[in-house]
Structure formats: C-alpha cells, structure tokens
Amino acid sequence: MQVSPGYDNGTVRRNLFNQTDATTLVSAWGIRHTLLIGSEFGRQRSTNLRQTAYFNGNATSVLVPFTDPLYRTPAAFRPSATDAHNTPQVNIAAVFLQDQMEFGRHLQLVAGLRYDYFDMNFRNLRNNQQLESNDHMVSPRLGVVVKPVAPLSLYGSYSVAYLPNSGDQFASLTATSRTLKPERFNNYETGAKMEVNRRLSLTAALYRLDRTNTTARDPNNPALIVQTGSQRTNGFEFGVNGNLTSKWMIVGGYAKQDAFISSATTGAPLGAKAAIVPSGNLSLWNHYRLLPRVSVGLGLIRQSSMFAGIDNVVKLPGFTRADGGVFLDITERVRLQANVENFTNTRYYPTAHSNNNITPGSPAAARFGLVARF
C-alpha cells in the first residue's frame, strides 16, 4: 500500500468584531411589538501556510507492505510548489431589524431582515497576486408561534443564510472564484415544544434545507467553474431536556435526515448522498445524584454510517460511544470532576475530509478538572 506522511496546515488569525443590539417594547392597536435593531462590524486578518511532509527529505509517499505495515523513517515539513501561503483580510458590515408581534396570549409573528456586506482582500504570497471579492447579501426571516394551551408551543419558520465564495475559512480565492455568487441556504422548519412540567421539556421539529449555487467543473470546459449544483436535506429532530426526578437529569436528542444531491453536476450525480451526513444521530446524557455532594454521569452517542465523499465510494461505519463522569461538590461554588470519554475503547471514525483523509476517533481518555464559579 502507498502511504503519505501528511501535511501541516497552520493559520495565524487576528479578529476584531463589534455587535450592538437595541431592544424596545411598543404597543399599538392591541398588538405588542418587541423591536430589535442592531449592527455588526468586523475585521479578520489571517496568514495561512501549508507545508508538505517528505520522507527522508525528498519523497511525499512510500510503499509499505500489508504484511509489515509498521514503517519508521524521519519526515521533514516544507512548502511544496502548490502549498498555500496567503494573507486574506475580511471586512464585514451588517445591519438587521426584527419585529416580534404578540396578538394576545396565543399567537406571535416574527419578521426580520438582515443586510450583510462582505469584502475580502486576498494576497497570494507565492506569486504576489492580489485579488478582491465583495458580496451584498439580504437575508429575510419569517416565523409564527401558536400557543393553543400554556404548556404547548407550535411554530413554523423560514430563513435564508449565505456562504461567501471564499469558503467558511476564507483560505482560498482565485480569479474564477471571486466572480461566483455566495452559496444560498433556504431553511424551512416546523415544530413543537411541550413543557411537561417546570423542570422537563420536549421538542420536535421537521425541516428542509435547500442549498443552491454550489460549484462544479464546467462539463464543456474543465478550466471553468459553473454554479448549477444544489443539495437538499430533509430531516426530523426530537429532544428532551430536564429532570425526570429530583435526582435524575437527562439531556438527549435524536435526528433522522436524508441529505442528497438535488441537481446533477460533473462532480455529483443526481440523488447521490451528501458527504459526512449520517442518516441518524442519537445522543443521551444522564446525570444522577447519588449523595448530596456526589453525582455520576453516563452518556451515549450513536451515529449511523455515512459516505466520506460525494462520489459515495467510501463509507464510514456507524458507531456507538459511551462516556462517563464522576462529580464531587466540595462547596456550593467549587466542584471536582473526572470525565472518561469512550470508556469502552470503541474504534470509530467520526468524520473525514475525503475518501483518503479519514479521522479516527479518540481511544479511551480521562480528564480531571476543578471547576470554580464566581
């Protein structure tokens, strides 16, 4: 088999952000308005440097036999000709307005609008190329909440979000990508929240997320990029949070989702499953007080199988992980605790960056801590 030693991808980042919100209550014509107005301004400057690892200083990969897979040799890190070295600077400015309207005790409407200006100056230190990109994005939000009885709330919502063409880490910009529109996310959701009692609540939701303006190679000219791709996710979520008894507290949730390609591109056929999206997730944490100052915790995480890439060739197996903890309240403000993650030492793979860049989960690990509240 062929083995590559890997890479080192370092980022130095400085951020300066300011967010200002103002809220006021207004009553008019029998309707109670909670008005929210705000702004956000920020600047982020980064330096990205990727270095490739070389075996014995000159080879990026070696052949290792399956019969003897243990291989020891020094590896040195240095930039290759294609490794990224750049300094992006991102400037953002946003304003938003929202009105939450209450029509008596049983009905609420929410309407909001946000405007974002996104500007990116990108310098490639490999060739001193200077690029700039800017986007103007308008995001509406609409929602309704119905309370037929005091403990039960039913809601529906619609919202829009964007991802600029430089990606979520702003680490890459080219002469082609700077001309692309931001990816758009339309989210539709309906659900319910039930207060079983003052200490226990249940939630449930159905949702659909449509992602558009995804990119792919132009089938007529591989040197060009087209934005004809789209992805759809349909899902259901259920959650529980609170106390079952005076000593037993639980936090848990289950999610079932189907994420697939809804319009074909050269890189993703119609109907292909989205990468790194398990069809089912279950998490449950139990906290039980044994004695007035001593409590224990037990948590379970279950994740179904999922594909590592959009080509649906490599599948990561599903897994179940168990965590635990012991907590000692020394005083009302000081707590000593011990947490054990994956105490069954399950081998699992929670995520991947491609078909051949798969991340293993941590083996059994213990952490000890002293927590103080002031």
Image (cartoon, rainbow, N blue to C red):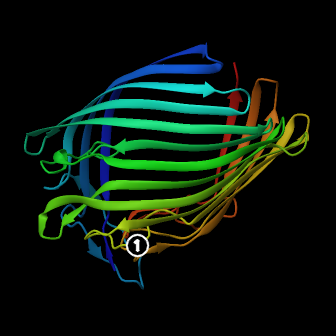
- Residue 154 percent across, percent down from the top left: 69, 43
Q: Which residue is mark 1?
A: 272
Q: Nearer the viewer, residue 54 or 87?
A: 87
| Residue 131 versus residue 309 in the image, above or below | above
Check the picture and name the quadrant holding the N terminus: bottom left
Q: Viewed as shown, does residue 326 lie left or right of 319?
A: right
Instruction: Give me the residue at 34% from left, 55% from top.
Output: 212
- Residue 134 percent across, percent down from the top left: 21, 35
Residue 17 seen by the camera: no
Check the picture and name the quadrant holding the C terminus: top right
Q: Find numbered disc 1 in the image and state the secondary structure of the residue it sits on.
A: loop
Q: Neighbour class for label 1 at 10 Å: few (<14), some, many (≥20)?
A: some
Q: Amino acid at mark 1?
A: Ala
Q: Nearer the viewer, residue 309 or 178?
A: 178
- Residue 334 percent across, percent down from the top left: 76, 26
Q: Nearer the viewer, residue 271 or 242?
A: 271
Instruction: Give me the residue at 35% from left, 35% from top.
Output: 138
Residue 233 seen by the camera: yes
The outermost residue toward the bottom is 67
- Residue 202 percent across, percent down from the top left: 75, 47
| Residue 18 versus residue 120 in the image, above or below | above
Q: Viewed as shown, does residue 255 lie left or right of 285?
A: left
Q: Viewed as shown, does residue 168 lie left or right of 233?
A: left
Instruction: Give me the residue at 31% from left, 49% from top.
Output: 9
Instruction: Give me the residue at 82% from left, 25% from top.
Output: 331
